[in-house]
Amino acid sequence: MAASLPSQMRACSIAKQGGLENIAVDSVEVPSVGPTDVLIKVGYAGVNMIDTYHRGGVYKLETPFTLGTEASGTVAALGSNVMDLSVGDRVASYGLGAFAEYCKAARAKVVKLPEGLGDKEGAAALLQGLTAWTLLKEAYPVKKGDWVLVHAAAGGVGLLLCQMASYLGAHVIGTTSSEEKAKIAKENGAEHVLQYGEGFVDKVLELTGGEGCAGIYDGVGKDTWEDDFKIIARKGTICTFGNASGPVEPFPALKLAAKNVKVCRPTLGNYVYTQQEFEGYSAELFKLIADGKLNLRVHGEYPFSVEGIRKSQEDITSRKTMGKLVIKVGQ
Ligand code: NDP
């Protein structure tokens, strides 16, 4: 079933992976839905570091493709096998193609937004919220009283990790690159915030009574990787989940033996692979928001234009942003 749909729409197309100059907004055909798809009229799209990896080529993709991995809005059309949603439902989705007036998503990656959560909050919460929550539930399941470390603590995922880990009863140490960011991280659940570099390792060991951290959540990657091994506790878990400074290099397994360390390299997609997983974790995330446990800090809203999308990517990689960036697509 479909509302009356236009045949053409504006979409952010990437014809060739590379620099910001490769971002274009073109007129393209509105995607047609397959039997298990949902077409969303996009209100807001969330901006994530992964968009810069997709555009830049850190993650190779077949071109051309439509940029963006997170959309919120209303259902505009449904595949013939999708019986549990209706045209007009307010939803959010996870998957490529979000920077467009209409976004096609697999039913298994679409969730209804609860009453009280607007399109903007939906796009601000979903991908980074699910990432933070699944890291804390599955990658290293945080326990009450644990010392954990969150790198880039004032970033989109970072601020949510700090709040959620603190809610789950952990002592959270954050890292940031500036005092301004440290202040924001402290207001959002980090007990201590340190700047990277000189003295950082000693300070973590001092705070943790010489033991180190039971869990490290590292979205920075290459630049923080070696220090992670100095501050991880015996039998601790390093969760390396991002490449903000570049991907970590291959390493010998024997590196783990010094403290019986576990290392995991999770992706959100594998934690919310099935519809049941996606909806289950989304329901937990939305409950945290409804219960007032999470502050969704939106750093900036950008227009749906070549300039707006380029600027959002420039800003998220410039290390200036604190919290979530969103693009306003619809009216
Ligand atoms: P952020 O808002 O956290 O922005 C990135 C932050 O990384 C910056 O603000 C900066 O904080 C820090 N950083 C450190 N070194 C660099 C560098 N060389 N260049 C740019 N930034 C740097 O982005 P997101 O919240 O969107 O993502 C955070 C991380 O989580 C990313 O690595 C992303 O890829 C990853 N991620 C992984 C997912 C998964 O499924 N595995 C899903 C979602 C996100 P500071 O200046 O304080 O160091």
Image: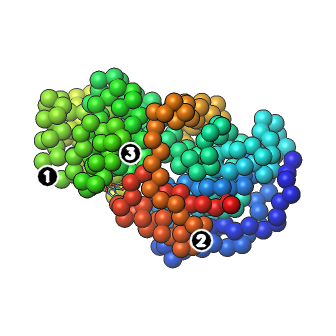
Dot placed on the residue nearer the N-terminal end, 1 or 2: 1
Q: Nearer the viewer, residue 218 or 75?
A: 75
Name the secondary structure under disc 2: loop
Q: Which mark is residue 158?
A: 3
Q: In this view, does 239 lie above or below 196?
A: above
Q: Is residue 148 above or below residue 195?
A: above
Name the amino acid, label 2. Ser
Q: Crowdedness of circle 3 by 10 Å Cα count: few (<14), some, many (20+)?
A: many
Q: Which colour scheme is used?
A: rainbow
Q: Cα distance, mark 1 to mark 2?
A: 41 Å
Q: Is residue 211 left or right of residue 50?
A: left
Mark 1 vs 3: CB contact within 8 A:
no
User: In which quadrant of the rendered image does the C terminus lie?
Assistant: bottom right
Name the secondary structure under disc 1: loop
Q: Cα distance, mark 1 to mark 3?
A: 22 Å
Residue reaching furthest to the top: 144
Q: Crowdedness of circle 2 by 10 Å Cα count: few (<14), some, many (20+)?
A: many
Quarter where residue 222 is shown? bottom left
Q: Which of 327 and 39 is in front in this view?
A: 327
Q: Crowdedness of circle 1 by 10 Å Cα count: few (<14), some, many (20+)?
A: few
Q: Residue 305 carries which label?
A: 2
Q: Cα distance, mark 3 to mark 2?
A: 27 Å
